[in-house]
Amino acid sequence: MIVRKDVPIDWPLLIAALREEIGWFVLLVVMGFVFGGVGVLVAISYENWLDFGALLIGGIFLLCGIALLVAAFIGPVSSVGYHYHQGLLGKHGVNVDAVLTKKEVQCQFHQDYDHNNNPLGEGYLYCDLLVEFDFQFNGSNYSGAYYLGKAGLFDKLRGGDLLPLKVLRLDPSVYKVRERRLANILKGREPEHPSQIPVGAEISQQV
């Protein structure tokens, strides 16, 4: 989620979020230049530019370097946004109750392979636990969605349940489910049976 452009930037929080990710950013940039540099050197170190092996190895290193440089800017940007929003919610968040309108399990099958393209193990399911809800804030109606990180909470939820949120006062499109508070509310409730979550599935920890 992105904070609206008309919301003032909280520079101390943004700087703190950047500090959280600066190490990974620098590491990926350095590795990207190293791999890219090695790729160029390997390719130009041969007098015969038609040497397929040299060009292939150099190209692989160069592509790895480019991929690392791209990851250096894409990955940390997402993480910085997450830490910044969490800081904003902690500083300017307001507690609001939402009404659960839908919950859904979204799964994808993952299979690992060895260097001969043979499957390793039987694979596994990786699932996102999506909840959708409606809430009111300052006299206006809003709808939202959030990925829960705990299967136990997801299984206990029923349509129409109240979900405790923390909403950014400056921009209600930025919010999070207060999972600790939700766990206290649902304490003692039996989970639904059968569960919508496949047995043995791994639960995504989205941010």
Image: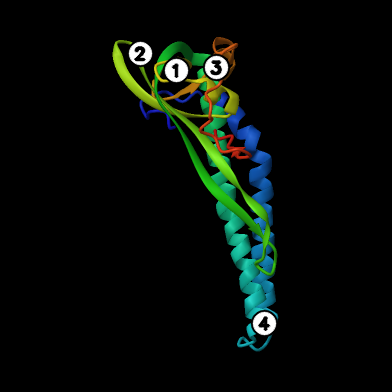
Mark 1 surroundings within 10 Å by alpha-carbon count, few (fewer than 14), some (14 through 19), many (20 or more): many
Image x and y of residue 52, in percent: 63, 84
Is residue 150 in view from this perspective?
A: no
Image x and y of residue 148, in percent: 53, 28
**Residue that lies at the very extreme toward the left in this rendered image:** 140
Tell me if 68 is positioned left or right of 88 in this view: right
Between circles 2 and 3, the one closer to the viewer is 2
Mark 4 surroundings within 10 Å by alpha-carbon count, few (fewer than 14), some (14 through 19), many (20 or more): few
- Mark number for residue 90? 3
Residue 135: quarter of image: top left
Badge 1 marks a residue whose secondary structure is strand
Give me the residue at 63% from left, 77% from top. 56
Q: CA distance from mark 1 to mark 4?
A: 57 Å
Q: CA distance from mark 1 to mark 3?
A: 10 Å
Image marks 1 and 2: residues in contact by CB distance under 8 Å: yes
Badge 4 marks a residue whose secondary structure is helix
Q: Which residue corresponds to mark 4? A: 53
- At label 3, which amino acid type do we have? Gly
Mark closer to the chain start, 1 or 3? 3
Mark closer to the chain start, 4 or 2? 4
- Mark number for residue 167? 1
Mark 2 surroundings within 10 Å by alpha-carbon count, few (fewer than 14), some (14 through 19), many (20 or more): some
Tell me if 7 is positioned left or right of 71 in this view: left
Mark closer to the chain start, 4 or 3? 4
Q: Which residue corresponds to mark 2? A: 137
Image x and y of residue 185, in percent: 54, 10
**Camera-side residue of 156 and 45:** 156
Tell me if 48 is positioned left or right of 132 in this view: right
- At label 1, which amino acid type do we have? Val
